[in-house]
Structures are given as C-alpha cells and as structure tokens.
Amino acid sequence: MKFTIKRLFCAFIGAVIIVLASLILSANNFYFNILYSKSVATNFMRNAEINRNIISPITLRHKKANSFYGSNATHIFNISNSSPFGDANERMLLCMVCCGEARLEETQTSLKSAVLFSSSPLTLLVFTQPQHFHVFNSMVKSWPTSVQQRVKLSLKEVRYPDDVVEDEWRKMFVQCASLRLFLPMMLPKIRALLYVDTDVLFLSPVEGLWRHLRAMNSSQLAAVAPEHQDLATGWYNRFAKHPYYGKLGINSGVMLMNLSRMREFGWSEYIVPLKEQYEQQLRWGDQDLLNILFHFHPELVYVWDCSYNYRPDHCMYSSACDAAEGPGIRVLHANRRAAFTDKFPPFTHIYQAMKKFVVGRDSMYNDLYKPLLLKLSLRPDAQCSLTPHIYLHQLQLYTRQLEQE
C-alpha cells in the first residue's frame, strides 16, 4: 500500500514538473517573440530613417524583414500618370557604352545595324573614351548625306558620378557596362532612350522597339526580356544568391528606359545601397542589381518577349524561344562572344555580313539577305542552326518594304 502511494506521489510530482516546464518554455517563447518583433520594428524604423530619401516617393508595406531590402519585404510604388509618351515625329535615341579598343568594331557594327533598320530620325549616343571619338566620327562621315541628315551622333566621355567609386563600378562585369545604371541622372534632360549592349544587332526596325514606350502602363519604366525561358536551364533560379525578377530573372542587354519616370521614382537612391548590400553575391554585375531592384518593384517592369533579345541561350541546346518562331528574331544579342566563335554559326554569319555592309552603296537584299540565306543553310546541324528562318524573317519583310517604297 505504502509502495503504491509512493508511486502515485512520484507520478504526480513528475506531472507537475512537466506542466511547469511547459509553461516556462511558452513564456520564454512569448517573451522572445516580443523581443524579436521589437527588434524588427526597431531595425525597420532605423533603416527607414537612414533611407528616408528613398522612402519619400514610395508607399511601403512592410512584412517580416530585418532590413529595408529584406527578403520578404514588399514595396509598392505609386507613380503619377503621365501623358502618352512622345509623338510620331519624335527622334529616337539609341545609347551604347563602349570602353576599350576591343569593343570598337562591334560597337560600330551594332550602330550600323540600327541605321540600316530605321527610317525615322535617330540619335546615336555613345559613351566612350575621348581617344576613340574620331573612330565614330569617321564612321558617320562615311555615310551618305541623306543618312547623316536623319541620323545624328552624340559622343560623351565615360565618366561616373562624383559620389561613387568609379573604379569599382567600371569593373563590375563587362567594363563600363554599369554606366547604364546612372543614365537617368547623367542625362537629366532626356526623356527616354533605348540602351543596347555593344554585341547587339538589329534585325528589325528600331521603331518597333521604340513604340513600346507608348504601350507601357503608368508605373512601368523599363522594357526588358526574360533571362531564360524555362526553369530547367535558367541561371537565376538555379544559382543566384540574391533576389531576382520573377521566376527566371531578366536580361539587361536590350533595355528601353523611360528616364523621366526613373527620375521620378528616385532611381539614383536605390542603386548604390543595393550594391553595398549585395556586392558579395553579384555574378553578372549591373544586371544583377537590376534584377534585385525589379524583384522588390515588379510593377516597374514591362516584359517583352525573347525575340527582342535573342541570345545563344535560346538555341544552343534546342529552340527555346517560341516567340521568334513566327515573326522571327527582332534583335540579335551575340553575348558569350557568339559573333567571334564558330560555335554559333548564325551569329557569326550575321555579324560578318553586317560588318562588311557599306551604307549607301550596298543593297539590303543583294548584299545582306541573299548571302545570309545561303550561309545559314550550310550547317543545319550546328548549334543554333536548326531553325534558320527565324534569323531572316524580319530581314526579308524589311527588304520587301524597302522595295515597295
């Protein structure tokens, strides 16, 4: 009997201890959550104070986050409605950044392709070193008077804002490519421009891209194409250590920029802090910074399809750009040095044909379309050669249009 009572007493004491331990643990968790919430709120307020100039044009909805750019933070930007952009006679502005002698040839070839595939007034804005100014001036002077009357050249020295460490930004990825991030501030009187990398070639009218400014809604300020088309081959979704836009990220090699809206948004206040926070995680330099910014502000992005930024990634394994199957490629982006290797024959052939083309002397049909039609059929089994028609469809349409005119 005594043994039974002793066992019951021990069981009772054990149960009491378990209950008390549970209560203490719950109290600690409750207290910890209070402290954590207070810490989050304190961090948020401190960062809000530090970034008050950033927050001022923004309505900020804060979720659980430990910094202003926390991984779960949500930002909502309300931009004022602006009138329809431009008019039918507005001069288009194409911008490139060319640093180093190694990029001169491809920059000239890219500019030439824009001139060939346009008929409206066009300004070519090139940021480069002063010692290279004569190269671009000589190129334009070699064109017929009729072309020079329509196309204007503007040369500016590559120079970063005074409040950033220029050497760090110059060497982020491709030399000087990060300059594009500062264009809204460097060109305060310019309303919009089309930025392209130096390895980009136009295969359709520039006007076709410029018209997308009018298609943007009231919050969108940049038009870009996705980095990839499927999750199986995407880089950002498999390897990125930082936030990125959407499911696959964006590629910044062809970027239509509404500079007026960027300035109104407060663009300049975001770029440097983003670099400071994510610097150790960046792989593709300024493109990564754009992905991070657009991750937190997807409402700023106007997405056009891959035919506006067709790269070797879209064809090196299989045809991965359905948007180009019908209308063809509008803009060819020969990244991976695709124009200077035999790995991707269509990119090399198109670049060489465009490079050799003499403005004012050669025929778009006889000296561009016909030679390419022959060359693109020579190696149908090579990478990016399975669907040769997509490279020539827009060129064929354009040459027919020229004949009719």
Image (tube, rainbow, N blue to C red):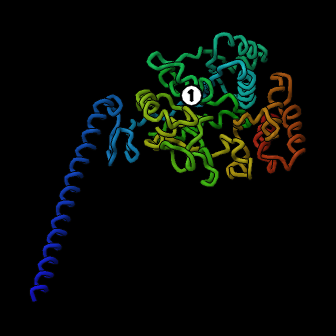
| Residue 107 vertical position relative to residue 9 in the rendered view, above or below | above
Q: Considering depth in this image, is 89 or 279 the residue closer to the camera?
A: 279
Q: Residue at x 90, y 44 (%)?
A: 378
Q: Is residue 378 left or right of residue 390?
A: right
Task: Tell me which corner region of the image, top left, top right, bottom left or bottom right, holds residue 133.
Answer: top right
Q: Is residue 369 left or right of residue 252?
A: right
Callout count: 1
- Residue 264 seen: no
Amino acid tagged 1: Met
Looking at the rendered image, the quarter that the N terminus falls into is bottom left
Q: Residue at x 62, y 20 (%)?
A: 125
Image location of residue 254, percent across then percent down: 62, 35
- Residue 106 seen: yes
Q: Which residue is under mark 1?
A: 172
Image location of residue 52, percent across then percent down: 30, 30
- Looking at the image, which residue sits at the far bottom? 1
Q: Residue at x 74, y 51 (%)?
A: 317
Q: Considering depth in this image, is 211 or 159 the residue closer to the camera?
A: 159
